[in-house]
Amino acid sequence: MTTQQRIPVWVKALDPLSQFGLVYALRQRPEIALVNETDLAALQSQSTGHRTAPPAVALIAVDSLDAAAVQVLRSATQRGCRRTVLIGSVIDDDALMTAVELGVSGVLRRTEATADRVVHLVQSAAAGDGSLPPDLLGRLLGQVSRMQRHVLAPRGLSHTGLSDRETQVLRLVADGKDTQEIARELSYSERTVKNVLHDVTSRLQLKNRSHAVAYALREGLI
C-alpha cells in the first residue's frame, strides 16, 4: 500500500495509557498514517490534480461519553476530521444517541478494540460507511422506534423531520403534479399546499419546490 493510499488518522484518548497504546498499535499498520494538528490543517487544503486528500479520521478513546468526551468529539470536527470512530468503555443508550447525533461513524467497545478491528473501523469510516456492534445497532433502532411512537407521532412528525402531510405533498410534487392537482388529490386548499411547501423549503433552507424534492429524495425522506 502506498503512502497516498494510507488513511490519515488523528488519535485522541483522554488518558495517557490509551493514547500510547493506540498510537503504538497503529504506527505498525501500513494502512494508517498517523497525523497531528498541523498535518490536519495541511490535509484540509491539500489536493493533487483532480484528487482531493483522503478524509482524515479521528480515533477517539474515552471511558464514558461525559462532557469532556463530547468536547473532544466536537473538536475533532473543528480540526478538520471528516469521520470519527469512538472507542468507549461504557456505551449506554444515552451515550449511543449522543454519539450518533455528533456524527460518529463507528463505535467499538474498549474490550473489543484489537488492532485489526480498529483498522477495519477506520477503513469503513474513511469509505463513508457506519459500523456499530449488532447489539448496539439494535438498541439504537429501538430508541428511534420509541421516539417515533411516543414523541414524534403524537405531534404528526416522523424521524425524517417531515410531517405526514409534508411527505405526502413532496411525493406528489415528485410525481410531477402541480399545486391544483395536489390540492384536489389530498382534499386540501391550494393555499394549504403552498404553505406546506413554503414551510418545508424555509425550514430546510431550500431554494424552491424542485430543490425540496431533490433534497428529500437524496436523503431518503420520500
Image (tube, rainbow, N blue to C red):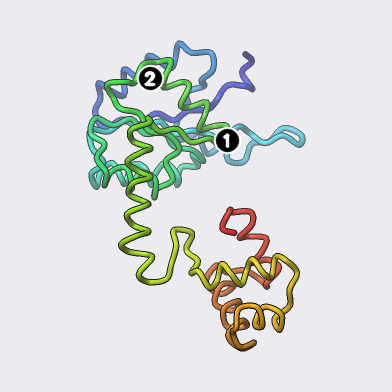
Find the distance from the CA under tag 2 to the CA under tag 1.
19 Å
* Residue at horizontal 56 percent and vertical 67 percent from the top: 167
Q: Earlier in the sequence, mark 2 or mark 1?
A: 2
**Which percent across, then down, holds residue 25?**
39, 14
Q: Is residue 157 left or right of residue 216?
A: left
The label number, if any, that marks residue 43 in the structure image: 1
Judged left or right of residue 32, residue 184 is right
- Name the residue that disc number 2 marks: 23
Among the 4 quarters of the image, the one containing residue 66: top left
Vertical side of 96 occupied by 187: above or below: below
Q: Are marks 2 and 1 in contact (CB under 8 Å)?
A: no
Residue type, label 2: Val
Which mark, by number, is residue 15? Answer: none
In this rendering, position of residue 17 left or right of residue 101: left
Q: Determine whether the residue tagged by mark 2 lies in a helix, strand or loop.
A: helix
Which quadrant of the figure contains the C terminus? bottom right
Residue at x 75%, y 69% (from the top left corner): 176
Residue at (32, 42) in percent of width and height: 96
Question: Residue 54's x, y, as percent?
Answer: 60, 32
Please name the residue shown 32% across and 54% down the image.
Answer: 146
Residue 107 placement: quadrant: top left
- The answer to which of 87 and 211 lies nearer the viewer is 211
Between residues 152 and 27, which one lies in front from this camera angle? Answer: 152
Q: Camera-side residue: 207 or 67? A: 207
